[in-house]
Amino acid sequence: MNFILNLRCLVLTKTFVLNIKNLNTAEDAVKIEDYFMGRPGVEKVDIEMSLSIVTLHYNEAVGSPNKLLEAFDQLGYPVR
């Protein structure tokens, strides 16, 4: 008798919504998006320039909120 084992990976995606200082230009948005899309665990970046809001969708098994906050500071965009 043959058994087929079907395993599915459960990925837990978290959403992190942040109000960012110094988010003034399209270049700022591109810099933030490019940086975070290259980080492990970040799946999607949404930026609302008019509200200075950045929404990060990330895999909590890989990324953490503290590391994401530190990265914004290092980029020169402190979180309000």
Image (spheres, grey):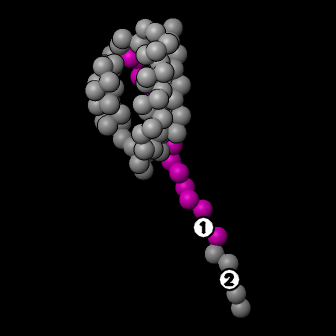
Q: Nearer the viewer, residue 64 or 71?
A: 71
Rendered residue at 29%/31% (across/down):
70
> Which dot marks residue 7?
1
Rendered view: 24 above or below 5? above
Q: Quadrant of residue 17?
A: top left
Rendered view: 15 above or below 29? below
Label 1 is placed on what type of residue? Leu
Classify residue 20 as left or right of residue 43.
Answer: left
Check residue 14 for magenta coloring.
Answer: yes
The residue that mark 2 highlights is 3
Rendered residue at 68%/78% (across/down):
4
Rendered residue at 51%/29% (across/down):
45
Rendered view: 54 above or below 24? below
Indicate the position of residue 56 as horizontal and vertical percent values. 47, 31
Indicate the position of residue 51 as horizontal and vertical percent values. 48, 10
Indicate the position of residue 78 as horizontal and vertical percent values. 31, 19
The reply to whether residue 44 is visible in this rendering is yes
- Graded by Cα atoms within 10 Å as few (under 14), some (14 to 19) or many (20 or more), the crowding at tag 1 reads few
Residue farthest along the right direction in this orientation: 1
Calculate the distance from the C-alpha at mark 2 to the C-alpha at mark 1.
Answer: 13 Å
Label 2 is placed on what type of residue? Phe
Residue farthest along the bottom direction in this orientation: 1
- Graded by Cα atoms within 10 Å as few (under 14), some (14 to 19) or many (20 or more), the crowding at tag 2 reads few
- Where disc 1 sits, the SS reads loop
Please identify the quadrant where the N terminus is shown. Answer: bottom right
Q: Which residues are magenta?
A: 6-20
Rendered view: 74 above or below 23? below
Indicate the position of residue 37 as horizontal and vertical percent values. 48, 35
